[in-house]
Image (cartoon, rainbow, N blue to C red):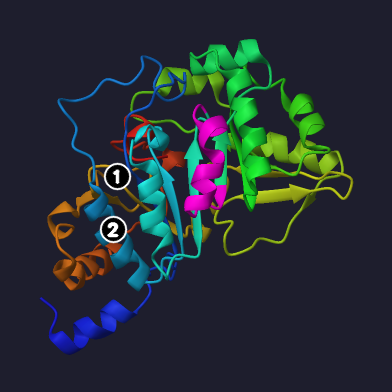
Amino acid sequence: MLSPPTLGKVIMSQLQDSFGRKFHYLRMSVTDVCNFKCSYCLPDGYHPDGKPKFLSLNEIENLVSAFGQVGTQKIRITGGEPTLRKDFTDIIRVVADNPHIKNIATTTNGYRLEKHAQEWFDAGLRRINVSVDSLDPKMFYQITGENKFDEVMRGIDAALTAGFERVKINAVLLKGLNDKDLPRFLHWIKNTPIDLRFIELMETGLGREYFEAHHLAGADIKAQLLADGWHLDTPSADDGPAQNFSRSDYKGRIGLIMPYANNFCASCNRLRVSAKGKLHLCLFTESGVDLRDLLQHSSQQAELIERLHGQLAQKKETHYLHQGITGVTQHLASIGG
């Protein structure tokens, strides 16, 4: 146990690992339930393990408070599908009420977006990522298992109308499925001010066969973009490992998240907490450290922060995906992607 003077210094310092990386971004899952059946994540749909008990609003408030004290400025509310929580708007307000948090975002499949975009914006949400893996309704249905393409697209329009600072579209690159969609996506962002992010397929604990069949290297897309006149933007502190590209004649931008690129982990700036209160230092390689016992009362903040600092010392330099080590993560919905 740290002595009180030392503990005071630790509490006031930003989360940093032994490789000098500083962490100001928390991806906070609030449920692992999802109503879509995306082929690269939950192909058989969501199946609960018993009766799950996800973090309560009070536990979320205490978690956000602790992370805010150690330098966290951005929180992304994730899932599963986070908007399935009946108290999702209340969760947004809890995060927005914390003075340390400057950027509040969420990632959603968009199925509730059309009806609730303005409500969420008014509660304090400012950035939103919507998963749209294809602009072909038939391929969208094939990948997601849901015939909701038109509904999701109307939701994106509602988000743009509501006034979000940034609307991003996430698409997982899948060879033999949506790899022919790039021209459609480019046509869409020509006159639409959104950020389109292509995410390279990552192998998880249950996905070897799927990965080998559908992995498409992000480096190939990058080469194509550069050849077509797109320019690599100077990275900002908010970008993390993403590489962003722009063209003066396009209103939208393109981002690439390429976990198999060299030095991908060098710019890591994010931590994850699962819907059941486990801290994950990486999307892969480890099973998480329980924080829930220290989320019950605000009086536990100092001890919680001490645990956070102690765990950051254990963070590894890389995810080791290049060596085929996928860790214990069975699917990305389990810890919020």
The correct choice, above or below, for 330 with respect to 93 in the image is above
Q: Is residue 125 in sight in this rendering?
A: no
Residue at 53% from the left image edge and 31% from the top image edge? 115
Quadrant housing the N terminus: bottom left
The Cα atoms of the two marked residues, 2 and 1, are separated by 15 Å
- Coordinates of residue 239 in the picture (x, y in percent): 59, 56
Judge by depth and name the residue closer to the eye, 153 or 73: 153
Residue at 74% from the left image edge and 56% from the top image edge? 233
Seen in the image, is 277 located left or right of residue 179?
left
Please report the bounds of the magenta region as a residue range: 111-127
Circle 1 Cα neighbour tier, 10 Å, few/some/many (<14 / 14–19 / ≥20): many
Judge by depth and name the residue closer to the eye, 162 or 254: 162
Determine which of the numbered discs, if any, sits on residue 274 in the image.
1
Residue at the extreme left: 1
Residue at the extreme right: 249
- The local secondary structure at tag 1 comes to loop
The correct choice, above or below, for 100 with respect to 328 in the image is below
- The local secondary structure at tag 2 comes to helix
Seen in the image, is 310 located left or right of residue 23?
left
Mark 2 residue type = Glu
Mark 1 residue type = Ser
The correct choice, above or below, for 13 with respect to 322 in the image is below
Check if residue 23 falls in the magenta segment: no
The correct choice, above or below, for 124 with respect to 214 in the image is below
Determine which of the numbered discs, if any, sits on residue 61 in the image.
2
- Coordinates of residue 310 in the picture (x, y in percent): 23, 67
Quadrant housing the C terminus: top left
